[in-house]
Amino acid sequence: MKYKILEKIKSPADIKGFNSEQLEELAEEIRAKLIETVSENGGHLASNLGVVELTIAMHKVFDSPKDQFVFDVGHQCYTHKLLTGRFDAFSTLRTENGISGFCRPTESEHDIFFSGHSGTSVSAGLGLAQANKLLKSSNYVVSVIGDGSFTGGMVYEALNNGGRSETKHIIVLNDNKMSISENVGAFAKYLALIRSRPEYYRFKASTEKGLSFIPGIGKKIADTLYNIKTDIKNKIYKDSTFFEDLGYRYVGPVDGHNIDVLTNAFEVAKKVNGPVLLHVLTVKGKGYDFAEKAPSTFHGISKFDAVTGESIQSGDSFSSMFGKYLCEHAKKDESLCAITAAMGIGTGIDQFRKENPRRFFDVGIAEEHAVTFASGLAKNSMKPVFAVYSTFLQRCYDQLIHDVSLQKLKILFAIDRAGFVGEDGETHNGIMDVSFLNTIPDIVVYSPCCFRSLCADINNALYADKYSAAVRYPRGSQNENVKELNYDCIDYCTFGNAQAKTVIVTYGRITSFAIDAVKALEKLGISTRLVSMNLIKPIPEEVINNISQCEKIFFFEEGFRSGGVGEAVALKLLEKGFCGKFKLTAVNDEFVAHASVSAQLKKYGLDTESMIKIISEEYHRG
């Protein structure tokens, strides 16, 4: 498709002189580009389609990067990228060495904050605005946050703190589900339109100022008018008072797909001397029928056919198999409950919701609450299962310590997206959970390499382990070669020549690569065997006994070296008097950039080819 307007935009300044017709045409081109690119690269589609006009209006009214935009989560920043000089690079979205699917300050001066997790934009924006105030800067800060993020507590902490700040901080509440306010009747729409016009605020300010000069009765008249206006407004906009009680000037709700209305509303917000909450109504997936009808499906999606809307990838995954096993246990165990933090579909437990609605709890984007809520369920004899992405479990460290471990409660943590996640990059990789779980007493941690181990681990976590357990597994499916493993022991499995003095030790997904490495090394005359750990905390003594007599041990870990399983195994070997060679390959002290999972594994020496190279070089070295 030819993008006759979009391809000419090199900076936000290029749209300043556009008229309404040109801006509408630009919006159409942006939507076409979003669908074209995400269908090829995967990414977040529905959320980006919903904020096209909103983002255009922001760049029309404000002057980025002097005026700073903070996008909550950042999964809706694609239009922002297209308007800030990244059209030519947009085809590289979410590919290795290409542009990120989230805001990334190292990528552009227009990206103010790294993003990827929910509920942070109001706090970050308030900090930026307070800094501007201290520096006597006249620049604005705009925080864009969806209504879904209002299910998390951090937003309210920021609102409570920011309402009295007297800063030039504009919060855009992107309401795409009408979950906060009702827009009742024609009069409400009319009043919203009037209140979104600059003329309304100029008239309001001049009237209040004029009344104040009338001796004796002026203030009384102004107060009476204010009370009447407030009473009427409160009956129509039930939630506007919530924000105004906190100290924000509430503007809206306004049509989030009408660029003229949006630009007027932003001009109004700029005239307010203090923090503003602009309530914008949008449709998630706007302009693409498949995404409008199924916004959850097109929230974060892999490659798909843009004509039919059908996903190109299919088949069982660790997530879907986890959901299946959980449903099977729930049929026999009435105490089993499932908890999600707004990720029921992503974590594979949506079927549990359909079959057991009374025992399914979606707490919204509130992971910290989910853990302590699970603790309450566990205290009163239920068996809670919290299904959560590894990257979002990071938010729960204190709750895991104080509300779970210290209480000695029994909860199953189903940790999805463990390890590298590929194109979502730095903010979403699940490579820290092992290190921080290793510091928490009594929590057992499993990392299955296949569906068979996953099934066994869930059973152990629910019925064999005394206290809480975590079962961590990657995105995607198992590799078929894991069926060749020897499962003599439940805590670990083996492959290869049992007498070999060179051993690969690993766990989780990369076990399949180690199997192929053992086969290839055997052909090179290097007799090697594999020990794949299923239980990774505590370290099974059987594993240490199995490998302690080897001459060379190569530990490969899809996670951080510091605090990881490899370090724990090395310490136990040292305590046992091991005198051979021990080499640990893992992620050092750095964040892992977005790329395909295969590219990430190769970069950090965790694919089959890298394992062969590392072991053969050491073998020939002596």
Image (cartoon, rainbow, N blue to C red):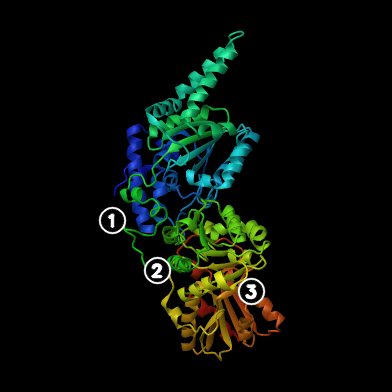
At mark 2, the secondary structure is: loop
Q: Alpha carbon of mark 2 to alpha carbon of mark 1: how far?
A: 22 Å
The picture places residue 238, in percent across and down from the top left corner, at 49, 33
- Asked if labels 1 and 2 touch by Cβ distance under 8 angstroms, the answer is no
Q: Quadrant of residue 587?
A: bottom right
Instruction: Decide: is 85 above or below 205.
Output: below
- Of 251 and 578, nearer the camera is 251
Asked whether residue 534 appears in the rendered view, the answer is yes
Q: Amino acid at mark 2?
A: Asp
Q: Residue at x 34, y 37 (%)?
A: 24
Disc 2: which residue: 316
Q: Which residue is mark 3?
A: 538
Q: Earlier in the sequence, mark 3 or mark 1?
A: 1
Q: Amino acid at mark 3?
A: Pro
Q: Which numbered mark, 2 or 1, is in the foreground of this view?
A: 2
Can residue 616 be seen? no
Relative to 580, is 181 on the left or the right?
A: left
View extreme (bottom): residue: 499
Vertical arrangement, residue 75 with respect to residue 351, above or below: above
Across and down, in percent, residue 594 comes to 49, 60
Residue tagged by mark 1?
308
Badge 3 crowding class, 10 Å Cα cut-off, few under 14, some 14 to 19, many 20 or more, is some
